[in-house]
Image (cartoon, rainbow, N blue to C red):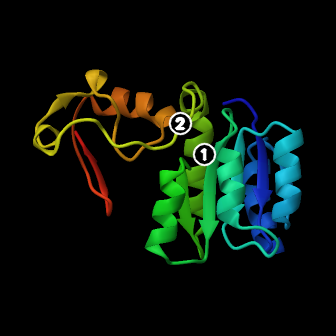
């Protein structure tokens, strides 16, 4: 795995230190800030392979910052949040983040998530990002099995993750509603 460049945005200095140390110990370059507005400036002016963003920032909505990071085609986004709102987590997932990590978290669990992101990085950024969509299949069609390589979309995943999911899942059964997404294989 090549060293990555990571942007960390969290107003808690302890979180910046812990996450920064987890990434630095594996040789990754880390840029950290406690300001969402400063995070926006970094995203606008510099390249990052990974963005780890807190949703509860004092000066900018963390969802807005995550949206800006997701819009960068070579940046994979992991969101941290003390909020237990399922709606917020779904909103973040629908915009195309890689993972949503609730606070408090165990350092080992976050390290595993970040290592997964950085190990899969070439596959995650090899397809252009588009908003999550719902398949054109009718409800009757979604309830039966489809060859994933011929499917229009893997429901619930941003396009840049769809190719990887198709490779991993092979044949896929999927169903979508406004409340949940199911991808099974």
Rendered location of residue 56, percent (x, y): 69, 73
In-front residue for pair 31/27: 31
Task: Return the residue at label 2.
Answer: 130
Give the quarter of the figure containing the C terminus: top left
When asked about the image quadrant of residue 180, the answer is bottom left
- Disc ID at residue 138: none
Q: How many marks?
A: 2
Q: Residue at x 80, y 72 (%)?
A: 11
SS for dot 1:
helix
Q: Residues within 10 Å of mark 1 (few under 14, many from 20)?
A: some
* Structural crowding at the residue carrying mark 2, measured as other residues with C-alpha within 10 Å and reported as few (<14), some (14–19) or many (≥20): some
| Residue projecting furthest to the top | 150
Q: Give whichever of discs 2 and 1 has the lower sequence position.
A: 1
Residue that mark 1 sits on: 115
Q: Quadrant of the N terminus?
A: top right
Residue under the point 49% across and 76% down: 85
Q: Nearer the viewer, mark 2 or mark 1?
A: 2
Estimate the x, y position of residue 4 in percent, counting from the top left. Answer: 75, 37
Residue 107 visible in the shown view = no
The answer to whether one can see residue 37 in this image is: yes
Compared with 47, 179 (above or below) is below
The reply, left or right, for residue 69 in relation to residue 87 is right
Please tell me which residue is depicted at 72% across the width and 38% down the height of the picture.
49
75 left or right of 36 in image: left
Q: Position of residue 170 (x, y in %)?
A: 26, 28
Q: Residue at x 42, y 27 (%)?
A: 163
Q: Position of residue 71 (x, y in %)?
A: 66, 41
């Amino acid at each position: 795995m090549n060293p990555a460049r990571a942007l960390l945005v969290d107003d808690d200095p302890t979180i910046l230190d812990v996450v920064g140390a987890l990434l630095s110990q594996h040789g990754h370059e880390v840029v950290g800030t406690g300001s969402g507005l400063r995070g926006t400036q970094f995203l606008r002016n510099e390249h990052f392979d990974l963005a780890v963003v807190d949703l509860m920032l004092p000066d900018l909505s963390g969802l807005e910052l995550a949206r800006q990071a997701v819009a960068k085609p070579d940046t994979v986004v992991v969101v941290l949040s003390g909020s237990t709102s399922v709606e917020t987590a779904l909103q973040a997932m629908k915009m195309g983040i890689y993972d949503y990590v609730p606070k408090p978290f165990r350092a080992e669990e976050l390290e595993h998530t970040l290592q997964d992101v950085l190990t899969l990085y070439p596959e995650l950024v090899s397809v252009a990002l588009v908003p999550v969509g719902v398949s054109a299949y009718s409800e009757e069609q979604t309830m039966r099995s489809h060859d994933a390589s011929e499917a229009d979309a893997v429901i619930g995943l941003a396009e840049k993750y769809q190719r990887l999911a198709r490779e991993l899942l092979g044949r896929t059964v999927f169903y979508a509603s406004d409340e949940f997404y199911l991808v099974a294989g």
